[in-house]
Amino acid sequence: MVQREFAGKTVFITGAASGIGYAQALAFLERGASVYALDMDEKGLKKLASAHTEHFRYSKGSVSNQTDVTEAVSQAIDSFNHVDILCNTAGVLDGFAKTLDTDEALWDRIMSTNVKGMFFVTNAVLPHMLEKKSGVLVNMASIAGLVGGGGGAAYTASKHAVVGYTKQVDLDYCREGIRANAIAPGAIQTAMTAADFDGDGKIAEWVAEETPAGRWAQPEEVAKLTLYLAGDASDYIHGTVIPIDGGWTAK
């Protein structure tokens, strides 16, 4: 029997159409929460909506577009009256481009989604949380926010920014009932990492071999960690970054 520990809670999730965001949305819905999602891709959102008509709503839009974000958060409040948990999950990769291979357009695209988008969404949701003196933020960092080698120059810089932003938001608002933490995934098998499995899959094999646990993880594993960070059991965990990387950063 699935626990309904999040019954009565509303979760706002970015990047929920696929991968980790989709797994997070499904996990919260299965545990009684209402979910509002923002994503550019409607396919996965429509799939969630068809199965959870009463407790799921969504907007098509980009986190890097402040108008899209403002309208989505407004609709979430109109639909469910409040937002209790924010999962800033939307993100894009940079193809492991070194700094000299990174042009301004690529740099701006990565920063706009991974950093400015998180800033837009947080600033749209946070005032509603502060009104009721309660709220949890779970930001998606990466092992690239802790060490080099998890991405290219832009992606690694963006995820280091996410780590710092998470710590500062928690420090600034924790006495007002807000908790902010981040998750730092390693090798997670999603649509974003599908290229590693293309062809003979040698890249995926190499990543698994280099990971101490010897395998890739599934999005559902990250979703389970999200549930913990969003729940009452983690109430004393503040401003931290938890790796879920099969031991990659322990090397």
Image (spheres, rainbow, N blue to C red):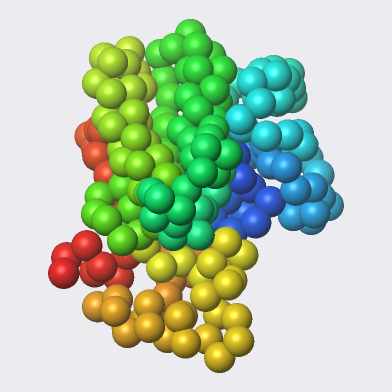
Taking the spot 38% from the left edge, 83% from the top edge, the residue there is 206
Along the viewing direction, whichever of 5 and 155 lies nearer the viewer:
155
In this view, 208 is above or below 111: below
Q: Residue 107: where, in percent of width, then height?
A: 49, 40
In this view, 112 is above or below 15: above
State the quadrant of the N terminus. bottom right
Residue 36: which quarter of the image? top right
Residue 194: which quarter of the image? bottom right
Along the viewing direction, whichever of 51 and 74 lies nearer the viewer:
74
Residue at the bottom extreme of this rendering: 200
Q: Residue 217: where, in percent of width, then height?
A: 43, 71
In this view, 135 is above or below 190: above
Q: Residue 193: where, in percent of width, then height?
A: 54, 67
Taking the spot 57% from the left edge, 61% from the top edge, the residue there is 192
Determine whether, in the image, residue 239 is placed left or right of residue 121.
left
Q: Residue 156: where, in percent of width, then height?
A: 36, 48
